[in-house]
Amino acid sequence: DQQVKQNSPSLSVQEGRISILNCDYTNSMFDYFLWYKKYPAEGPTFLISISSIKDKNEDGRFTVFLNKSAKHLSLHIVPSQPGDSAVYFCAASEGGGSQGNLIFGKGTKLSVKP
Amino acid sequence: EAGVAQSPRYKIIEKRQSVAFWCNPISGHATLYWYQQILGQGPKLLIQFQNNGVVDDSQLPKDRFSAERLKGVDSTLKIQPAKLEDSAVYLCASSHPGQGTDTQYFGPGTRLTVL
């Protein structure tokens, strides 16, 4: 039973355009959400997070939106750059913030074309 | 600041053999995690340590997997005996509550292939 779902295995975007990566979750007890980026042969790198008391968090080109009623979050990257090409994982935790057991989705591979 | 170190980076063994992985967390990080990432899946937590105590090992297959963090710094994860389905990347992460961005920092992982 997958509690965190990333239904798009891959996404291709033109450089300079917006990339939107989506994530759905089923556990209503999740109260902290994170996005990680992963390059080949490297470990995941933290990108941005959001607490369930917020509906938006922004950091430079990256914005995460949370819709609790729909149990849905999304990551927007504007403008997209070729260096953003990587696998993006959505993760969620219950009660532990970023310190707890992170439940990860399967990831979405983003390709940004020059 | 040095990141999370893991070794070896790659390991190939036959089923029923034993294998051990080593992790050195970021200096000063009290919390250490071991994750298993099977191809095409996201990482799954196996065990979480706070200093040298276990916080969560509910998803660790204890009949074959063991982990220790004796001095609250380095950690080893062992599989004995290995099965084909243990083929995966084993990721170590560390964090420190209250220290700026208290997120989990991941190492590069050890890719295990069980033949």
Image (spheres, coloured by chain):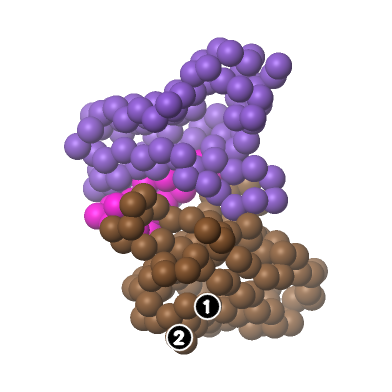
Chain colours: A purple, B brown
Which chain is indicated by disc 1? B
Disc 2 marks which amino acid?
Lys
Q: Is residue A107 visible?
A: no
Q: Which region is colored magenta?
A: A89-106
| Residue occupying the far front of the picture | B1
Q: Position of residue B29 (x, y in %)?
A: 41, 67
* Towards the viewer: A8 or A78: A78
Residue at left offset 47%, top offset 81%: B69
Label disc, if present, on residue B71 of the rendered structure = 2
Above or below residue B52? Residue A34 is: above
Look at the image and tell me in which quarter the C terminus of chain A lies. Answer: top right
| Magenta run includes residue A94 | yes
Tell me if A47 is positioned left or right of B18 in this view.
left
Q: Position of residue B4 (x, y in %)?
A: 56, 63
Q: Position of residue B56 (x, y in %)?
A: 36, 71
Residue highlighted by disc 1: B74
Cα separation, mark 1 vs mark 2, equals 7 Å
Q: Residue at x 47, y 45 (%)?
A: A46
Cβ atoms at labels 1 and 2 below 8 Å apart = yes
Tell me if I can see residue B83 in this picture: yes
Q: Position of residue B10 (x, y in %)?
A: 75, 65
Q: Is residue B8 left or right of residue B37?
A: right
Q: Nearer the viewer, residue A4 or B6?
A: B6
